[in-house]
Image (spheres, rainbow, N blue to C red):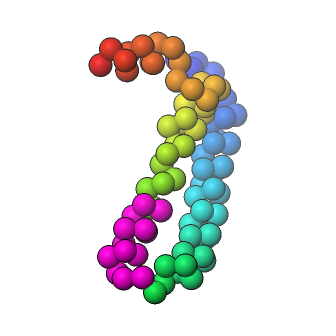
């Protein structure tokens, strides 16, 4: 457990916020041009996928913010395998 403050947490929060804004602007700018003529159902599926895809790297990013390493600690990996 972390006992002292670290620069990674505020840096990570600000970085995540900026990255999500950039991602959202890119999607809002280019996705309508690409899928604008598709059916409403197809567009909905694409927007749901694009809305969830940013979650893929989030676990490793949050681990880095807490521990300073990009992969889960060995104790966490062993526990997940046991479950």
Q: Position of residue 77 (x, y in %)?
A: 45, 18
Which residue occupies 48% across, 54% down? 53
Q: Nearer the viewer, residue 18 or 81?
A: 81
Judged left or right of residue 77, residue 17 is right
Please say whether residue 66 is visible from this viewpoint: no
Q: Is 3 placed above or below 5 here?
A: above
The answer to if 40 sits in the magenta stretch is yes
Which residue occupies 60% across, 46% down? 13
Which residue is farthest bottom? Answer: 37
Residue 12, located in which quarter of the rendered image? top right
Region rendered in magenta: 38-50
Residue 28, located in which quarter of the rendered image? bottom right
The answer to if 37 sits in the magenta stretch is no
Q: Nearer the viewer, residue 31 or 62?
A: 31
Q: Is 83 placed above or below 14 here?
A: above
Which residue occupies 55% across, 78% down? 34
Q: Position of residue 65 (x, y in %)?
A: 60, 33
Instruction: Identify the main secondary structure in magenta.
Output: helix
């Amino acid at each position: 457990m972390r006992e002292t403050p670290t620069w990674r947490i505020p840096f990570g929060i600000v970085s995540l916020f900026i990255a999500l804004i950039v991602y959202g602007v890119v999607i809002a700018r280019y996705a309508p041009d690409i899928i604008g003529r598709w059916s409403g159902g197809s567009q909905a599926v694409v927007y749901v996928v694009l809305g969830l895809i940013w979650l893929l790297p989030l676990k490793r990013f949050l681990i880095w913010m807490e521990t300073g390493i990009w992969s889960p600690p060995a104790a966490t990996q062993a526990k997940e395998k046991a479950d």
